[in-house]
Amino acid sequence: MTEANGAGENGDDDLSVVYDLAPACTAEDVSVGERYHATVNGVVDYGVFVDVSDEVSGLIHESELDRAYDVGDKLIAQLETIRDNGDMAFVPGEPEEYRTVAVDADPDQLRDRIDDLEPADTSVVEGKIVQVKQTGGPTLFHVRDGTGVIPAAAFEEAGVRAYPDVEIGDAVRIKGIVERHDGSRQLEVNSLTVLDGDEAEAVTERLETAVEEWAEPHDVEPLIEWDAMQPLLEELEGVARLLRSAVIEGRPIRVRHHADGDGMCAAVPVEYALERFIGEVHEDADAPRHLFRRLPSKAPFYEMEDATRDLNFALEDRARHGQKLPLLLMLDNGSTEEDVPGYRNLAHYDIPIVVIDHHHPDPDAVQDLVAEHVNPYLHGEDYRITTGMLCVELARMIDPSITDELRHVPAVAGISDRSSATAMADYLELAREAGYDEDDLKAIGEALDYEAHWLKYDPGRNLIDDVLDVGSDDPDRHRDLVAFLSERSTEAVDRQLDAALPHVEEEALDNGARLFLLDVENHAHRFTYPAPGKTTGAVHDRMVAETGDPVITIGYGPDFAVLRSDGVRLDIPGMVADLSAEIEGGGVGGGGHLVVGSINFVQGMRDEVLDALIEKMGDAEIDEAIGSATAAAE
Ligand code: MN
């Protein structure tokens, strides 16, 4: 820290000391009587103004001057007085011999923590720019340090970009006054300096350390003891860390979830936890709206239409609101080869993808494209650990204070996806303690499915909260709403079955399983609830209940077929791959779970494809434990 030069001998303590202040040094770093290296910054009739740092200046009165000075001249100045108003008076004071002592700014004295800023404070904040937003008035620079993110308003002219050279990611020092604006704190900028060199590096290092600590997920006890989930919990910690870092760094999070009961039981808790964490980190009251978006996916994979919309939305937000590109979180969806084209489209940009899913995965196809992939199949488990169960734990790692509101959610998820996990008993018990019996949970699942259908591409934020009873403020309304919706759902399914069942055709398969076929295009109501997937599922359930035998059900339309099976060891993704290779010009695609899925083809090849499919089904092995392997996946 001490550097010797000037006319003296190195290290001679008897020599006069002249301090060389770092640019960031403040009035706290100077004392009356001490000498400083100074630079003339202004010449007036009554003297010259000198800077001893970027922050500290003072006047040498004309009567003290022994020669003329120009702006930029260097000299040694001795601090003579500090007036009550903070003005400083210096005198020229170059000793014959001296040594120079470099003084670094005291970093903690200099900077304020964003979290600590109080209205009316004059503050200095050092951090990084995470967003630059031009309003009709000032330019808003969202700046973060290790403790929070605050908007800093700089005004050039109404609607005109202030500090046009400042960019996202710049390390800056902002001086200003803290004010309240629409109930939130905002820094009114007096000066904004982009830091470079050592100073920028120091800010980067400080922020990296702080983010690492702050992003650390909460250490929560899982809601139930379940060994099978253990390895997944460790991976979910990694996801929680990524999501918390994204929030701290001002990177928006976009969630795509399967639009069914389990998918919503996964996405809603994560939404709830992240919104709270965003509110904790970001001062801007609009931040949760800008930094988080949950959207349902109709297909059980990332359709190119969704991927294109997401990308377009992200790029527009970046252009219009100066936002970073988002992180994409795929829930109850996203593990399969069908997701690859959408992912590859995003890969042209800095958009990390995180997947939490329990559909049978194609790890070889997606692994290189995703930052994290949590899936029970990757640990020798299966769909019985549902995405909703996983995401309730994830949400609690992000914000454990929401635990009490989520105790019934894993059970709803499990019932919706017909999880036969032994742990379901524990989840049902947990829900019972929170006041929901099994019929309540089933009704919630049905109501979610029913509303998902009518909401189409809308997340239905508040409505879904009321149906699922997470963050809902009126328990009576929740109960009435679920009763109404689940009743409507049951009526609609019954109406569909009344129309469809007389047209269901049966074929015997070579392996002894019974095959039921329904033309959902001609013998079911269209464009209403339940859609073909759920209609086929309802027919299938009826047949399983009536026969007690191994059953496969196919609901086919002009260019697609929905498949359900119980008691037969199908490998739908495998069959799809084989048919695609074997039937020339069939245009076969699709996939899903092993025993629940869908297949698509070109209309003119339907008979060939269905015949070949049925032949493969007749070759499949019969399961000894009948009725154990169905998962709902429309
Ligand atoms: Mn699911």
Image: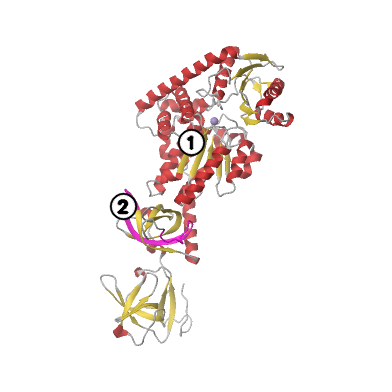
Say if mark 2 contacts mark 1, CB within 8 Å: no
Q: Which residue is mark 1?
A: 267
Q: Which residue is mark 2?
A: 180
- Residue 123 in sight here: no
Left or right placement of residue 59 versus residue 348 in this view: left
Mark 1 C-beta closer than 8 Å to ligand 1: no
The location of residue 599, given as percent across then percent down, is 64, 28
Q: Which residues are magenta?
A: 161-185
Q: Is residue 404 magenta?
A: no
Q: Please, what is the three-letter code of the amino acid marked with disc 1?
A: Ala
The quarter of the picture where residue 332 lies is: top right
Q: Residue at x 41, y 76 (%)?
A: 19
The quarter of the picture where residue 554 lies is: top right
Q: Please, what is the three-letter code of the amino acid marked with disc 2?
A: Arg
Q: Indicate which disc, 2 or 1, sits on the residue closer to the N terminus.
A: 2
The correct choice, above or below, for 156 with respect to 527 in the image is: below
The correct choice, above or below, for 187 with respect to 473 in the image is: below
**Which quadrant contains ligand 1?**
top right
The quarter of the picture where residue 557 lies is: top right
The correct choice, above or below, for 370 with respect to 497 in the image is: below
